[in-house]
Image: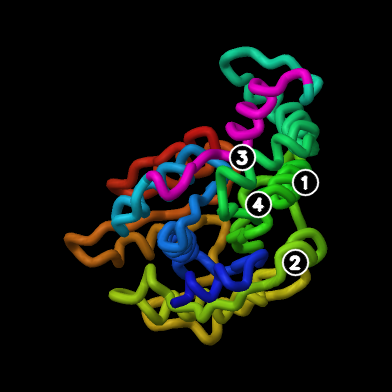
Amino acid sequence: MTASRLINRLPCSVELPAGGGKTWLLVDTIREGANQSGKSLILTHTNAGVYAIRNKMRALGVDPKAAHVSTITSLAFDLVRSYSRIAGLTVPEVPVWKDAGQYIEGACRVLRNRHIRDVFGISYRYLLVDEYQDCSLAQHAFVLELAQAIPACAVFGDPLQGIFGFRDKIVDWQTDVLPHFPPFCVDFIPYRWIDHNRALGEWLVQIRDYLKPGSQIAFHTNKPTGVTFRLATSSRFELRKATTLVPKGETAVVIAPPDKYSARLVASHLDGYVTMEDVGG
């Protein structure tokens, strides 16, 4: 029912926190669109995101032919390679990802061609973009060009989950996203915690406003069941003591500061703990 309502409200944006069912709703929208004889173009940022969407489609029994799933940059590269003269850019057979910005700009030029826009409009009825909080302004411009061809567009994201923006400025949800994609309100249900630790899921939603710039969060009050707060000292003795309190037979994860070598340093002071290294961020 939610997917049906969403389709009737396109274009729109969906903001949901982690564990709130964004991917589920996106895939259910693909299914609802297919039921209305429409194919969807699905875009996200990473290959891992593409895999997650395809995996969810399989899990929910959605026909893989109901959607084409791609990363934003891969689609841009394909457009530039297919229409290099219009793009004003010649690219190699294999993408050079450090040139991704050029691919995005070239793809925007391609999409300004009315005939190519017409092809997209004929090929796809819906445009759905996941993890929109990580869109750079250039990628946002690319999506807006696509939306000219496929007006039935929805973007899904959570401004508090942005993981990019180190090099290129990313979209501001209020000033960049909402003017083009009005909010579509969805009741939040903490699906990720619904069978265990539901209080934690609900607490994470309650503190969202306190996680925004300029706000403060009081970790020592209003904690959900099972959460404790302890002031740490430079000796990190409190951390070592906490790890000894893990019940026998259970496992624990320690999240260390992002400084270089700090995870190794923390692990070296704990019995039986190993370090999980970053993999390309």
Tell how many labels.
4
Within the magenta stretch, is there residue 273? no
Q: Which mark is residue 72?
A: 3
Q: Provide the residue designation for mark 1.
A: 141
Q: Is residue 237 visible?
A: no
C-alpha distance separating marks 2 and 4: 18 Å
Which amino acid does the dot numbered 4 rest on? Ile
- Residue 120 vs residue 59, the one in the foreground: 120
Earlier-in-chain disc, 1 versus 2: 1
Residue 27 position within the rendered picture, expressed as x and y whole percent measured from the top left: 43, 58
- As rendered, which of 256 and 46 lies closer to the eye? 46
The mark nearer the N terminus, 1 or 3, is 3
Which three-letter amino acid code belongs to the residue tagged 1?
A: Ala
- Determine the CA span between mark 1 and mark 3: 12 Å
Disc 3, SS: helix
Q: Which element is circle 2 on?
A: loop
The N terminus - image quarter: bottom left
- Residue 77 colored in magenta in the image: yes
- Asked whether the residues under the numbered discs 1 and 3 touch, taking CB atoms below 8 Å apart as contact, a structural biologist would say no
Which disc, if any, is residue 178? 2
N-term-proximal mark, 4 vs 3? 3
* Magenta residues (range): 65-85
Q: x, y percentage for residue 264?
A: 45, 39
